[in-house]
Amino acid sequence: MPNPKNSTTIRVALIDDDIGFQTAVTDALASTPDLVLVNVAGTHALGLEMLNKPKVDVLIVDLGLPDGSGIDIILAAYEKWPNCNIMVSTTFADEQHVMQSLEAGATGYLLKDSAPKNLINEIRSLYSGGSPISPLIARKILTRFHQEHKKNVSPEDKASVKLSVALSLREQEVLEYITKGFSSNEIAGLMAISPHTVLTFVRRIYAKLKVTSKTEAIYEARNQGLLDK
């Protein structure tokens, strides 16, 4: 398959503690003229350290790292490298890991159930604007969407429709806690996430609503019908 951006070399970084998978990916990419593996890390700590190096085009992250969650790395990479394409490659197929990864900033989610050489086409697809997702994961996302749609959306409840379009589920949850006066630390405890993650969600809410404070966020959200007045 040709490179979608003919004259461009796609710079790839991998964060995965599986030595066998590291080797397989390294060998697969070594055979392609348009892909180059520039960094490899096998731990959460080294993965975060990698983000201090020059930005790559595609970052592949495993979730089950020996010293922490890959989701933290996705959040940090999304903030530090906003134009980087982030793809999860993992054995975790449960809904919680899937949704947390996508909400953190991943735009692809692949299970380690196919040959690493197939990853080459998925990297190219991600880089050219696609969102490679394993069929099992796609079904879980659609199921979740249908469940939320039935629960929250009706002709009489247009506010919920607007909310689902404007904010992710986790951003919605954070916004509602902010409206009730909870602090970042309290929200972190209620949602079982870190205060840093809460602040990341808050920044995204501010960016989407084009505001700079909690008061403005609440006012604008109510103005747009995203919250009960």
Image (tube, rainbow, N blue to C red):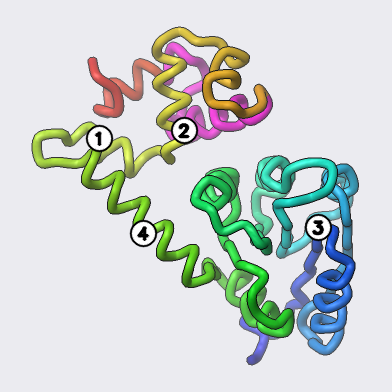
Instruction: Give amino acid for label 1.
Output: Ser
In the rendered image, the vertical position of residue 51 relative to residue 160, given as above or below? below
Instruction: Answer with mark 1 or mark 4, whichever residue precedes in sequence.
Output: 4
Observer-side mark, 3 or 2, equals 3
Q: Specify the label residue 15 is tagged with.
A: 3
| Residue placed under numbered mark 1 in the picture | 160
CB within 8 Å, label 1 to label 4: no
Q: Tell me what residue is drawn at x 34 percent, y 52 percent.
A: 145
Q: Tell me what residue is drawn at x 80 percent, y 62 percent.
A: 14
- Label the magenta part by its dominant secondary structure: helix
In the image, residue 202 lies at what x, y percent? Answer: 54, 26
Is residue 87 magenta-colored? no
Q: Which residues are magenta?
A: 196-217
On screen, residue 133 versus residue 162, left or right, reads: right
CB within 8 Å, label 3 to label 1: no
In the image, residue 88 lies at what x, y percent? Answer: 65, 59
Q: Tell me what residue is drawn at x 66 percent, y 22 percent.
A: 195
Task: Give how far apart the Cα atoms at labels 3 and 1 are.
Answer: 37 Å
CB within 8 Å, label 4 to label 2: no
Quarter holding residue 20? bottom right
Q: Residue furthest top?
A: 181
On screen, residue 48 versus residue 10, left or right, reads: right
Q: Specify the label residue 142 is tagged with.
A: 4
Q: Nearer the viewer, residue 62 or 180?
A: 62
Q: Residues within 10 Å of mark 4 (few under 14, many from 20)?
A: few
Instruction: Answer with mark 4 or mark 2, whichever residue precedes in sequence.
Output: 4
Q: Tell me what residue is drawn at x 77 percent, y 77 percent.
A: 9
Secondary element at tag 3: strand
Instruction: Give amino acid for label 4.
Output: Leu
